[in-house]
Image (tube, rainbow, N blue to C red):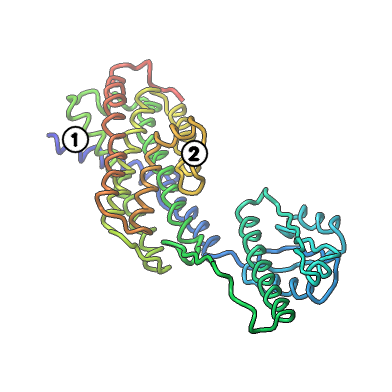
Amino acid sequence: MMSAALLDGARRELGFLRNSFWDLSLVTWIPFVLMAAVAIQLSAGVMRDLPIVVVDRDGSGITRELTRRLDAAPGLAVVQQAEDLGVAEITVRSGRAYAVVLIESDTTRQVLQGGTAEIGTFYNASYSTPSGAALREIGAVVQSYAQQLAVAQSAAILGPAKVRRPPIAVRSTVLFNPQGSYEWQLVALVHPAFLHLVFMVAVVGALGRELRDGTIGPWLGERSRGEAVLAICGKLLPYLAIFMGWAVLVTGYLAGLRGWPVQGSVLLLLAGYGAMYLAYIGVAMLFVGVTLAMGTALSATGLYAGASFAFAGAIFPIESASVFARIWSGLLPYTAFAKLLTEQWMIEAAPLQSFRQIAIMLVFLPIGIAIGMPRYIAATDRPATWGRR
């Protein structure tokens, strides 16, 4: 009888999805379109040819060579050589460039006299990621050219034999993502961010719909408490299966089709997906059980799951954030999943380290069920709670 209740719940939800175009779309082609859009936008991996403007007030051979080097850098493209800052500002404000490089009129004189000429850089912080990348590339080009000029000047004055290499040099090594690929870093995080949000909306909709339509009484009213619990679990099983399929698909896309191999354990990564979905089942059960209203629960879902990516600490550092932001981050299962994904996909961390993240996610399931499930089942005998939007 218990197994029959589980199967009955699964058949009930599958039957509903088969006859509801939009609910079925929510778990099929809509996630595909969202994830495909992100994958296509970030498929280039590394930012190239970021547009900049050069204002050369000096016009000498040295400054023209600097402009040529800036344009030749793979991450930059000099789209305009403006006469003054006013013209350059218009270009930046129109969105046709991210930064302005200002070369003052006395640059060559300062260089030839052995001084230090300053190259000004103005960048649009409204677009922090591309502007920051352009700023780093500009700095690298200017520093490289400055070193060559210094060596050439020293050789001309002292003779080539007197020129020595710098006594100390920095050798930087990028760990775990040496290519600096935004595809590997962002797509791997954005795909599960989309999936957990859509998953939670689908689960809240599946549970809340029975209250909204007043069908929870006929569905669970004649069942024992144990049978009711299993029927609810069966109702959610199709969603768990569908979204685990999405997890396998997105992992296969990046690791197989795009060639970003999982450095750690694929099984542990997929186990993390499963733990994340179970955690959001617990949270969904909590929201529906406490509110007993589908609309309110969906609104809470949007606020809770919709902000996960920003507060997970995967892109924006959470360590220096406010106390509220750090607490909010700790209350999101996606935060633990993002750590697990980084540990297993990129860092190749020890399994024990990632088991901790799975344990954190699984804590959300019993807490949510313990609070929300009794209230949800009790609503079968409370017709006053039915029909709320």
The amino acid marked with disc number 1 is: Ala
Circles 1 and 2, Cβ within 8 Å, touching? The answer is no
From the image, state whether disc 1 or disc 2 is nearer to you: 2
In the displayed structure image, the side of residue 1 where residue 18 appears, left or right? right
Question: Is disc 1 placed on a helix, strand or loop?
Answer: helix
Which residue bears the numbered disc 1? 5
| Residue at image location 33% in from the left, 43% down from the top | 277
Q: Which residue is farthest left?
A: 1
x%, y% of residue 76?
Answer: 66, 67
Q: Is residue 194 above or below residue 8?
A: below
- Disc 2 marks a residue whose amino acid type is Ala
Callout 2: few (<14), some (14-19), or many (20+) C-alpha neighbours within 10 Å? some
Q: Position of residue 140 (x, y in %)?
A: 63, 66
- Where disc 2 sits, the SS reads loop
Classify 215 as above or below 173: above
- Circle 1 residues within 10 Å: few <14, some 14–19, many ≥20: many
Mark 1 to mark 2: distance in Å? 35 Å
Which residue is disc 2 drawn over?
Answer: 307
Vertical relation: 5 (above or below) 214: below
In the image, 41: left or right of 263? right
| Mark 1 / mark 2, whichever is N-terminal | 1
x%, y% of residue 122?
74, 54
Residue 208 x, y percent position in the rendering: 38, 30
